[in-house]
Structures are given as C-alpha cells and as structure tokens.
Image (spheres, rainbow, N blue to C red):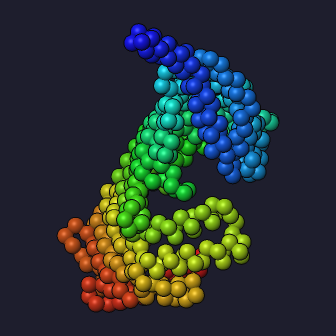
Amino acid sequence: MEQLRKMGAIGGAIALSLCWPLAVGQIGQNVVTDGVASLNNASVEAELLNYDRGYLSSTVQTRFTVVDESLKEQLEIDGLPTEFVVNSDISHGLLSLSAVSTLVDAEKLPLTLTTKTELNGNTDFNFVLSQLNHQSSGENSTSVSITKSTLSGHATVLGQINYELSIPSVQIDFPTGEEIILSNLTGTGEGKQAKGYWLGNQDFSIESFSVSDASMQPYLAIDGSTYKFGSHLDEVTKRLQSNVKLGVEAIKTSDGEVNNLDVDFELSNLDSESFEKVFEIYQSSPVMTQEDIESIVPYIDILFAKGFDLSMNKMSLNLGQGEFESKWLVSVPEGTENVSSNPATIVPALTGNLSTYFSNELVQEYPFIREGIDELIVMEMIKETGNGYEIKAELSKGNLVFENGQEIPLITLLMPVLLQ
C-alpha cells in the first residue's frame, strides 16, 4: 500500500509538471486579455486580433488604433500611421511568461518590447527604439532622427511603475531651414497614475537643447536643464502635496543670457477627493460646456472651503553679473466658503508673505529695474542692504503689508493680469 502511495504521488507530480505549461499558458492568456482591455482610453483603442496558445509558447496579435481625432489628423499630416498591429511571441516559463513584441510595419517605427510577466501580472518591461529616421510626406517635408533609445522598468498589477528612460539624441530639420537638436535626455520615475495625475516621483535631465534659424545661427540654447516632480497623498487626511523643481545652467538667446535658473514651486494641503472630481470633469471635456461648468462648481467650492497652499519656495537666477531671488506663500484658509457664488471673498481671505532680493549689479546693469527700485525707495516699500535691495511683505486681509506698515490692495497688482 505504501508503495502504491509513492507511485501515485510520483505519477501526480509528473502529470502536474506535464500539464503546468498549459496552465501557465491559460493564466498568461487571461493576463494578456485583461491587459489589452485596460489599455483602451480616449486617445487609443486596443483590440486583441488573435491568440494562438500552444503547449510551450503562444503567438498573439494586437491592433492599436488612434481614435482621438486631433491626434489622428496630425499623424496623417506627418505621414505617420494611425493604426498599429503588434506581433508577440510568448514563451511559457515555470512561474512567468516571456514575450518579444514588434510592430508589423517595423521599418517605419523600429520599436521592440521585451517583457517578463509573473503569473500574478507583475511585469518587467524593456522598450528599445532602434535608430529612427523619418521624413514626412509632401514637398516641404520635415525630417526627424532619433538615436537608439530605451525605456525599461517594472509595473505591478496595482498600477505601481518604476522606470528608466534614455534618449541620447533627437534632431528635427524643418523645410524652412530651422533645426532643433536635443542631447542626452534621461529620466527615472516611481509611482502610479492616480485618477489622471501622477502620484510619486519623476526626475528628468537634458544635457542640451538648441534651436537654430535658417542660417544655422543659434536662436535659443539651453544647457544643463533638470526637472523634478514629486507628489504625495496623506492617506489619513486625504490631502495632496506636489512639488516641482526646475533647474537650468544657462539659457542663451539673441537678447541675452540667463544663468543658474532655479525654480521650486509647491502646491500643498489640497483636498484630493474634490481635486480628482475637478480633474476628471476637465479631462473628459477639454472644451467646457455650460453643463460641465455647473457640474464642476460644487467641487471647486469644496476645494476652497477645505483650504490649500501655493508657495514659491525659491525662484532665483543670474542675469549678466546680477542676481535675483524671490519666494512667496499664498494660503487659502480652511473655511473659505461658497466662492463660486461670491468670488470677491477669495482675495480678502488670503494670507501669506513675500520676499524678493535684487543685487546691486542687477540694478546697475538694467536701467528699467533701477527706475522701479527708485520709485519703491521713495515709497519706503523696499530696503537697501549692503549687497542690494530687499522687499518683504505680509499678505493679510487682501492687502500686502510692508515692513513700514504701508498697505497695497492685492487686487491692484492682480488687475493687469486679470484684464489681459
């Protein structure tokens, strides 16, 4: 009897091992089918054309169609396809599926996707774009050249994504003679899409970006630029905080040069639930109808009623030999009710502060700044320091209150912007 049990166990194990590739194939088909269905959105429609599942491998064909009319029209103008068919060769492993996917018409877009998907749906991915040289149709055509580029990372079934991006070079030549060159774009990110916005961190850098005119003279040149974005959701308070940092070593134009640009902007304490509703309505209707406006108004009221903060933690640059630096904070306090029915209540409710610095070299080099500084000195709204000039003010009851006690209504500063 004991011998029969052993033989039965061995036989069961052999049967399971023989059937397991079929099980992996079935699980893989379910993962792929569900994944393709989830790709449908307002811009692209995905359709599974064929799934031929074998014992140790499968072949899949999927079609992606651009349905956004404006995007479709632009692709057609540029001589690019609006429909893509992808062939995938899938291998059934013990605990995962490996696939290599390529476009049917790969010479126009030489893109290859290699993936390894676990049975729970978590996937490692690696996009590789081979050397791309594209020229739009028509007599006055634009040419685009992109060197071999990669995008790799890991995606979970819960929507969490980690990725790394590398694009060594992009060159665009226009029929009028202008040229755009981008060098060494790299990026990393970790996070997920949360109802339309990115929740997590992203970090990009570009070594150089230049625009030349028809005579190949530099019109714009940007060196050493970085972009960092981070957002965080407090699960207890449901408040959203996001931060954007932009840095540029040098910006050169025909009008002059700016160096060491540094921008640090933050939006914090935003009610995520009402913000998501506003974002959802706006995304579904980029051109707002009266009905859309009426549906969005209650959520805007909630946003202001719960309060939020806007802050420029730092904005600084070097212009010529001079330096400029500014920072400010504007807070919408909690309890700012019914702003849609009475927008005039917003400005008086705001609180915050302002601090700005101009160096002596900046004031001396640019006469128009000198004129403004002289007026502010007469009004005692700016203070002269050893190295330059400094403005400090508090925002209270709709007024900017300066150190000397003088007040200026904030609305008078905003009026030119509102009129434009």
Q: Quadrant of residue 103?
A: top right
Residue 85 coordinates in the image, percent (x, y): 72, 31
Query: Front-most of 27 and 199?
Result: 27
Residue 223 in sight: no
Residue 47 in sight: yes
Residue 308 coordinates in the image, percent (x, y): 41, 73
Image point 57% across, 67% down: which residue? 277
Image point 30% across, 84% down: which residue? 402
Q: Quadrant of residue 88?
A: top right
Q: Residue furthest left?
A: 386
- Locate residue 329 relative to residue 85 in the image: left or right: left
Image point 36% across, 73% down: which residue? 329
Residue 271 coordinates in the image, percent (x, y): 45, 70
Residue 65 coordinates in the image, percent (x, y): 74, 40
Check the picture and name the quadrant holding the N terminus: top left
Q: Residue furthest right?
A: 139
Image point 70% across, 27% down: which residue? 51
Query: Front-most of 368 and 349?
Result: 349
